[in-house]
Amino acid sequence: VGAATFNLLVSTFAKVGDLTTAEQLLTKMEAAQVDATSPTYNALISACARRGDIQRAEEWMERMAGAGTTADVASYSALVHACAKANDLTRAESWVRKMEAAGIEANVVTYNSVINACARCGEAPKAEAWFQQMLAKGITPAVLTYNSLINACAKAGDLAKAEHWLSSMAERGVQPDDVSFSTVIHACGAKQDPQRAENWLRAMKSGKYPGVERPSSFCYNSITQAWARAGDAAKASGSLSEARADGIECSSASFSAVIAVHIRRGTLDDAEWWLREMIQAGHPLPRSGSGSCEALAAAWQHRGERSKAAEVRELGSKAPSANSSSGRTNHTNGNFANGRRNNQNGRQQGAHLR
């Protein structure tokens, strides 16, 4: 088998995720003194990076140097990405500096990775510093860059900055996508500002942004639950109704939140209506908590409506519970990564929140 075939095999196995076979083949190449190319080593380093295995990625970087093969921008960028996946910002920044010391210019992929590392660690000032360095080097940021920057500010609780970067994207000729908006909407919800989140949802649905698909279930669930936490039963119900009208799969947590806020507000008929809608939608019912059947039954009983309480308890006894194996999976609002992935068909998932 010639060197070209060996290199192709190693790269192929690494790219499909069969790291063990790829490593075995490259070890054989080294033992047989068959020259491995930079792309071959890079494929292995990238495979380690996808797993977030920094140590393994660094070992192959060292072996690459030991074999006399020169590392390039792809080699270093893969290592920075590995550090980001492992939430090791210090190490990520260290590899960027080593890269610069080796006389290799960072590219947009490198900067995306180090800014992503900042985002994952909630280091908004550092993310912005790397972004400014990127601009100073004349490198044009991509949507992925902005999304990581927005996420860094959101995780740091700096909603104003997150909104600023979302607004400035289009001004710089970069069209925001659904991840850009979803991150800001979630940040607004986390800050207990559902009206602000809803304003961004309206902007997202305005049709002004060609890179934006329809809002994901995560967006609607964030807003619905934020309105419920704010105690606004009408707004929470309205948000959940809008999501369903738009064909969005709403989470069990959103139904429960709406039921709970109606119970707190004493609008028990509305709470019961949403409970029945939750069952009709195929969601398992929580057996305890403020949005459960038992909470609604207790509220009816406290009001002296014993027959209503009994009816709700019977309804709950016949429906699958959240703890049962029947019924569909209880999708919570925390399932952001899956919601984004489903909504984007897997686009740009290296950016953040992973």
Image (cartoon, rainbow, N blue to C red):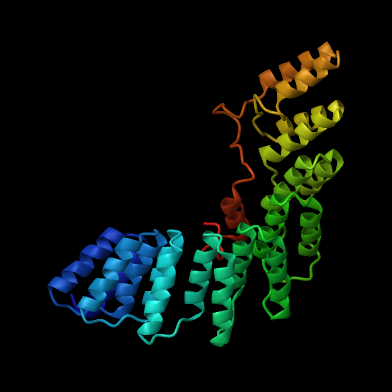
Tell me how many marks there are: 0
Q: Quadrant of residue 212?
A: bottom right
Q: Residue at x 22, y 67 (%)?
A: 25
Q: Position of residue 260 (x, y in %)?
A: 76, 32
Residue 248 appears in the figure = no
Q: Residue at x 67, y 37 (%)?
A: 252
| Vertical side of 338 occupied by 72: above or below | below
Q: Position of residue 110 (x, y in %)?
A: 47, 75
Question: On the rendered structure, is 105 left or right of 175?
Answer: left
Q: Position of residue 117 (x, y in %)?
A: 49, 65
Q: Residue at x 79, y 71 (%)?
A: 208
Which residue is most to the front? 125
| Vertical side of 353 occupied by 232: above or below | above
Question: On the rendered structure, is 306 left or right of 38?
Answer: right
Question: On the rendered structure, is 114 left or right of 242?
Answer: left
Q: Quadrant of residue 24?
A: bottom left
Which residue is most to the left? 32
Q: Quadrant of residue 276?
A: top right
The N terminus lies in quadrant: bottom left
